[in-house]
Amino acid sequence: MILNIAAYRFVAIADADALAARLHARAAAAGLRGTVLVAPEGLNLFLAGAEGPLRGFLAWLRADPRFAALHAKESWSEAVPFARLKVKRKPEIITFRREAASPLRAGLRAPAVDAPTLARWIAQGHDDAGRRLVVLDTRNREEVAHGTFAGALTLPIDRFTDLPAALAPHREALRDATVVSVCTGGIRCEKAALWMRADGMDNVLQLDDGILGYFARVGGVGYRGRCFVFDDRIALDPRLRPLRDGAPA
């Protein structure tokens, strides 16, 4: 079986170009495939390979104090779902172009809700203070088409950068709710929640570890369908099983 990991970490990286080169060399030597994005604000990784070499790569990476707390979400497949290894230097590890969305600039991350708590809120229809719950899906329309939380607020966007304009008509209606932003692995919901709070929406939380982390901890409670992933598996069900299990064509 092939181990697949999704991970990100917001941390200042002054040597992004040099780090990208080291990451590529180490991942290639371990026989890994997938995508690694390196930016001054942190790392974003989607990698797959044999379990031993991939865990060895993660151990090597976490030996760097900047990445010691890197948390990887895991799933399994019968074949490597990436055609090749790509390590890219980027301005952001997820493009949003909103300075207020950077945890490094803000000096903090938006408040988070864990998977068991969100599952309980979904079941009862409100948060623990009795406020109505709105799950805000920050993914694009193609991803949402594969599945989302029942009753979630979804936006007709094609790129993450479209979110602020698409959200604008809904802001007034969300004032009396507890809003939980969700996304695939946590990175977009973290940036979106931080930006929304900086923009005056202090009732917004992020889902810690995203939908994949939610599946791993509580399964599909309140979720309908699958979660789109950025590789040849296409989408994972709440038991983290792929829609299609095979090597890239």
Image (cartoon, rainbow, N blue to C red):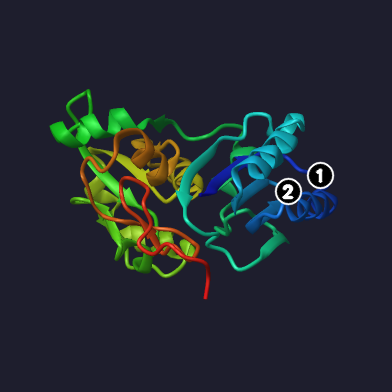
Question: Is 151 or 175 nearer to us in this picture?
Answer: 151
Element at label 2: loop
Residue situated in front as seen by the camera: 31 or 97: 31
Residue 233 shows in this picture: yes
Q: Residue furthest top?
A: 129
The amino acid type, in three-letter code, at marker 2 is: Pro
Percent of width and height locating residue 114: 37, 30
CB under 8 Å between discs 1 and 2: yes
Task: Report the amino acid beneath label 1.
Answer: Ala
- Mark number displayed over residue 14: 1
Q: Secondary structure at mark 1?
A: loop
Closer to us: 206 or 74: 74
Give the CA separation, mark 1 to mark 2.
6 Å
* Quadrant of the rendered image containing residue 86: bottom right
Judged from this view, the residue extending furthest toward the bottom is 249
Camera sees residue 11: no
- State the residue lying farthest toward the left: 124
Q: Which residue sits at x=44%, y=58%?
A: 229
